[in-house]
Image (cartoon, grey):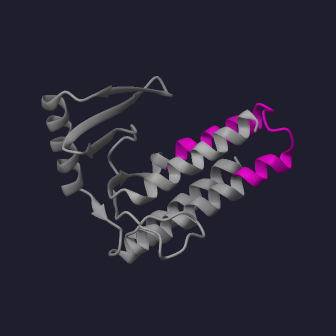
Amino acid sequence: MGAIDVLAALAKQLTKEYAQLDSVELWNEETVRSTLRQIRYYKESGLFETEEDAQITYRAFDELLDHLQHMAELGLKSMKGESDLVKKGSFQLFVNELILGNNTYILRLDGKTYAYINYAVLKYLATQDPKFCVNLHNSFQNLVTRSTLISKVGEKDRNRFFNLLREEAIKLRNP
């Protein structure tokens, strides 16, 4: 098994585990825009072997948006094509137009709280410091109260949000 196969299997396992965890997530357009910019950068830099590889990546991104919208509609996480019999985590997706995307994670597991804060693009600062984690969690909850829930409810807002993301995808792939 080559390195790419190992990474693909690991990514699939991580996604499967994520799909079983309950989560409350706070997004805005920037959450997705940064991923699209990365794809465009790789395309413009000639890092895809072929133009078709870039188009396959864009189509996979479109399918991901469709799947995320479906999960938000149900309020449940899943892997694409997964059986309804598989345990699914709840998915509470909130949208806030004013926050800046920073990929901060707060994980509560086995009575402990962990915080992971993104810095320097691909690096994370991790801490279990109780004061810091409580403060971060309280800040997150404050943002949630000022945000719009689009999971299970808010069909109009959910459709508007995902349509905006699709429009952004079209703009960024065809500058």
> Of helix, strand and loop, which mostly describes the magenta segment?
helix
- Occupied quadrant, residue 41: top right
Q: Position of residue 137 (x, y in %)?
A: 19, 42
Nearer to the camera, 58 or 23? 23
**Residue 96 visible in the shown view:** no
- Occupied quadrant, residue 135: top left
Is residue 36 found inside the magenta-colored segment of the image?
A: yes
Nearer to the camera, 25 or 112? 112
Q: Is residue 37 above or below residue 126?
A: below
Q: Position of residue 57 (x, y in %)?
A: 71, 50
Where are the magenta residues, as a range?
32-57
Farthest-out residue, right: 50
80 on left or right of 18: right
Please give the name of the residue rendered at 76% of the width and 36% of the height, measured from the top-left corner. Answer: 2
Q: Quadrant of the N terminus?
A: top right
Q: Is residue 58 above or below residue 70?
A: above
Is residue 45 found inside the magenta-colored segment of the image?
A: yes
Q: Is residue 18 above or below residue 42?
A: below
